Image (tube, rainbow, N blue to C red):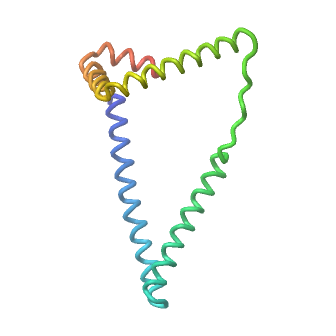
Amino acid sequence: MPIAARVGVAIVLVLLALIVLAGGIGMLGAAVYLAVAEIAPPATAAVVTGLAGVAAALLFVGVAALVGGGGRRRRERRPDGEAGMSHDAAAELGRLAGARAQAALSARPWVGPAVALAAGFAYGASPALRRFVRRQLR
């Protein structure tokens, strides 16, 4: 099976899983609301259910931050000498190219989508271009 088909199937399955997960979370929220509504007024039950949802979300974010390292990254050392100058030159070239691209796209906003559309057509029509891109992405 080609890689594009595998990626497509994976994306569809992930979207389906997210839809089922959203439905399950909705059912859980409704169950919590109904349980609290038996012992408290409906407005209070809604507030308690909302706060429970926010607390659960904060708990998940906290666990994700602990597992993921909390966003702390080590700073990379800047290269010295010629390597540092080449990085500075590359950064300056990137800044200039970005400024020119922004100016061109601001003057003609339709150019960006048109170029993306043309690139998509070229990628779809040219097997040689697809092979080249696949090799570059490996």
Instruction: Name the residue rendered at 49%, 91% in the picture.
Output: 39
Q: Where does the N terminus fall, quadrant-wise?
A: top left
Q: Residue furthest top?
A: 82
Image quadrant in which you'd find residue 33: bottom left
Where on the picture, by quarter, is residue 72?
top right
95 left or right, relative to 80: left
Q: Quadrant of residue 3?
A: top left
**Is residue 88 shown left or right of residue 138?**
right
Residue at x 63%, y 51% (from the top left corner): 65
| Residue under the image location 66 percent in, 52 percent down | 66
Instruction: Check the image and report above or below for 1 versus 68.
Output: above
Q: Is residue 75 above or below residue 21?
A: above
User: Does 56 sit above or below residue 62?
Assistant: below
Q: Position of residue 102 (x, y in %)?
A: 43, 25
Counting every numbered tag in the picture gives 0
Residue 89 pos. (x, y %)? 61, 13
Q: Position of residue 31 (x, y in %)?
A: 42, 77
Residue 15 percent coordinates (x, y) = 36, 49
Q: Could you tell me which residue is drawn at 32 percent across and 29 percent down?
A: 109
33 and 103: which is toward the camera:
103
